[in-house]
Image (cartoon, helix red, strand yellow):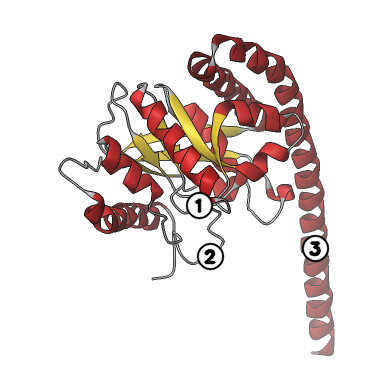
Amino acid sequence: MSGVFLLYIITLAKNIAIAFFMRWILRVIQIIYCIYAFSLFALLTLIAFPLVMLSLLLGYHRGGNLIYIICKYWAATWFLLIGVRHKEIFESPHDTNKQWVFVANHISYMDIPPIVLMAPQPIRILGKYESSKIPIFGWIYRAAVIMVDRSNAETRAQSFRALKTALNRGISIFLFPEGTFNMQENQPLKNFYDGAFRLAIETGTPIKPMILPDTIDRLHFSSLFTLTPGICRVIFLEEVTVTGLSAEDIPHLRDKVYSIMDQALRKYRRYPS
């Protein structure tokens, strides 16, 4: 009996040691993969940089449209070389000839590449001012996005006017209505700001909700060394019209879009009920 028990203990210890060793090996492989992936990111950014700067010679709007085409090729190349597969799913028809106020959940630094890949029509993203401070990438960022500093009321107003100008020029807008990362992994969404919905109502532009259910699996917000290959889906949801709405309807519109996105995220990911 004691011999059988001893054999059981030895086998158990062996299995634990093997499991620990395999986790260690997999972690080393992931770190090497992350270094490879972000080295490629830096290299592709350096290649894109002079093209982006030349595009600015065409003017803010024409040049901006060309910058998004450059960024689209940049993102597609990076995804291909690091083993991430971009996939678009349409839960309702999507008219690429219409202007939209696109809104999506925000949970990862990986949210941006799928956005520039998904839009065949001209688009501008509302981005945080802080990201413009990243060396080299920050120059491209400033050229491509409409920046907002949420701590400054004057720059918020300037950003809102720039968004309306873009819409008046036939360019769609993309915003994260949560404003910042949702770090509550047991909840699909944070509370929404009103800006996207006020913009849609004031310009009469329909809202196209989207969700990015996989970006947190590709790159968790906790560390750059959590990057993994795999699928990265963009889910286009049903259009929300704003015809006949006024400023008084902003809370109702915001809650309606929130509900649509919340239900979709619960459909494509598992969250506690």
Picture quadrant of residue 81: top right
Q: In the rendered image, which residue does mark 1 sit on?
A: 179
- x then y, percent, for residue 47: 72, 18
**Which one is in front, 188 or 159?**
159
The spot of residue 237 in percent (x, y) is 31, 42
Q: Is residue 91 visible?
A: no
Q: Considering the numbered disc 1 on the image, is that residue within a helix, a strand or a loop?
A: loop
Mark 2 neighbour class, 10 Å CA radius: few under 14, some 14 to 19, many 20 or more:
few
Residue 20's disc is 3
Report x, y in % for residue 132.
67, 37
Report the residue at 69% width, 50% height from top: 226
In the drawing, what numbered circle is on residue 184?
Answer: 2
Q: Going by the image, does 166 lie left or right of 54?
A: left
| Mark number, residue 28 | none
- Tell me the mark number nearer the camera, choosing from 3 and 1: 1
Q: Secondary structure at mark 2?
A: loop
Q: Is residue 36 left or right of residue 163?
A: right
Q: Are marks 3 and 1 in contact (CB under 8 Å)?
A: no
Q: Amino acid at mark 1?
A: Gly
Q: Amino acid at mark 2?
A: Gln
The answer for how far apart the CA atoms under marks 2 and 3 are is 29 Å
Which type of secondary structure does the marked residue at label 3 adopt?
Answer: helix
* Residue at (40% x, 51% y) in the render: 268
Please rate how many residues cluster around mark 3, counting C-alpha atoms within 10 Å: few if below 14, some from 14 to 19, many from 20.
Answer: few
Amino acid type shown at disc 3:
Phe
Residue pictured at 53% horizontal, 20% vertical: 64
Residue lying at 67% horizontally and 45% vertically, measured from the top left: 227
User: Image height check: is 237 above or below 80?
Assistant: below
- How far apart marks 3 and 1 lie (CA) works out to 40 Å
